[in-house]
Image (tube, grey):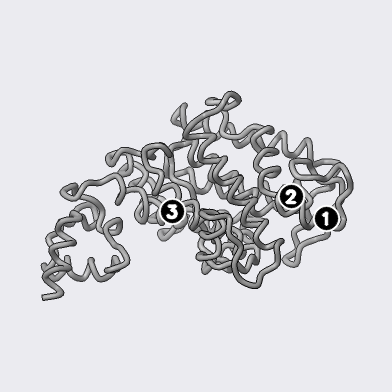
């Protein structure tokens, strides 16, 4: 493993451990706004990765007010609605468990089918897949073979989907056992997740919606591990697709890096800023906001204009210190 990926994996492990100092993942009832903000951003970006044309403002209007705006097809709005329903279910299912939540499993067949059913039902109701038969509705595995993808990967035959999904679920749940038995550490998790994500996409169990389902499954696993969900922003689309292609060749590091960056964005952008008080020392990256970027804060800290400390190759400060710096800068 190269120096760059090793550094990123260390940063991931440090950030997740650091998050526990600030209270870990908040429950939805404790922090409705933070989960709503993550929800809007995730729904927008994950659907945009698949080519959905709605902008963030339209996504927020649809989810907040059930309002359709702009000249877009109804299908586009229903894709977003379905992803939002499935994503919200993932968070609530784990953070406020229901009657069939299994603590000893990172994924079950019922959870996988439920995610796909919630994801695809709204769009299916207005625009069902043209090649689907009555057995391939949302939540059901495909009964068709799929053509080879542009980069050369050929999904398995539909006759093998059930057995491969069963093996895949078992492999996913081995990750939880390995962590509990301390055979692996947080440092190893992103590469394991990259393998899990790639294998799911190689199986391609559903006729449509596999990419979105696969990302939601990763978020289900992450939240079950008390790790913030991943958001792969649309500007990283090419990096993500290239990483998936490399994973087909058993090179999982690039995909692991994409996953880590998607998790760190949520830790520093949403969760630590919410959990830490005005006087609490927090990573400088988590104190950036609309008024000032992390790079600007870092320069101010290096120059001594912002009260900050440097420990373990990372800058720390407080919300109050940042506010004081911004006030002084205006003067």
For marks 1 and 3 on the same chain, the one whose residue lies earlier in the sequence: 3
Distance Cα–Cα, label 2 vs label 1: 9 Å
**Residue neighbourhood size for the residue with mark 2, other residues' Cα within 10 Å, grouped as few (<14), some (14–19), many (≥20):** many
Q: Which image quadrant is residue 246 in?
A: bottom right
- The residue positioned 64% from the left and 32% from the top of the image is 108
Q: Secondary structure at mark 1?
A: loop
Residue 72 visible at all: yes
- In x, y percent, where is residue 248? 67, 56
- The residue positioned 61% from the left and 62% from the top of the image is 68
- In x, y percent, where is residue 89? 57, 40
Q: Which residue is mark 1?
A: 146
Q: Are marks 2 and 1 in contact (CB under 8 Å)?
A: yes
Q: Which residue is mark 3?
A: 37
For marks 2 and 1 on the same chain, the one whose residue lies earlier in the sequence: 1
Q: Which residue is mark 2?
A: 204
Residue 192 visible at all: no
């Amino acid at each position: 493993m190269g120096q760059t990926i090793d550094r990123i994996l260390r940063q991931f492990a440090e950030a997740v451990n650091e998050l526990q100092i600030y209270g870990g993942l908040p429950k939805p009832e404790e922090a409705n706004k933070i989960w709503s903000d993550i929800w809007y951003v995730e729904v927008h970006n994950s659907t945009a990765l698949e080519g959905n044309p709605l902008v963030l403002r339209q996504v927020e209007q649809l989810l907040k007010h059930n309002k359709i705006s702009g000249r877009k097809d109804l299908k586009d709005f229903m894709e977003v609605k379905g992803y939002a329903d499935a994503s919200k279910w993932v968070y609530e299912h784990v953070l406020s468990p229901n009657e069939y939540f299994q603590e000893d499993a990172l994924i079950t067949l019922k959870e996988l089918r439920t995610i796909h059913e919630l994801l695809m039902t709204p769009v299916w109701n207005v625009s069902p897949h043209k090649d689907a038969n009555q057995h391939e509705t949302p939540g059901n595995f495909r009964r068709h073979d799929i053509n080879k993808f542009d980069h050369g990967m050929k999904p398995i035959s539909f006759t093998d989907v059930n057995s491969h999904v069963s093996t895949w679920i078992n492999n996913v749940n081995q990750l939880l056992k390995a962590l509990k038995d301390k055979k692996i550490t947080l440092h190893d998790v992103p590469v394991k997740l990259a393998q899990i994500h790639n294998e799911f996409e190689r199986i391609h169990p559903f006729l449509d919606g596999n990419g979105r389902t696969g990302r939601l499954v990763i978020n289900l696993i992450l939240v079950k591990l008390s790790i913030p969900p991943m958001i792969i922003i649309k500007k990283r689309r090419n990096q993500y697709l290239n990483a998936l292609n490399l994973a087909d060749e058993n090179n999982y590091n690039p995909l692991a890096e994409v996953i880590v960056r998607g998790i760190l964005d949520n830790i520093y952008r949403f969760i630590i800023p919410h959990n830490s008080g005005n006087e609490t020392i927090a990573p400088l990256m988590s104190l950036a906001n609309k008024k000032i970027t992390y790079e600007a804060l870092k320069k101010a800290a290096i120059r001594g204009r912002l009260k900050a400390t440097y420990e373990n190759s990372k800058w720390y400060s407080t919300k109050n210190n940042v506010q004081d710096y911004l006030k002084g800068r205006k003067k």
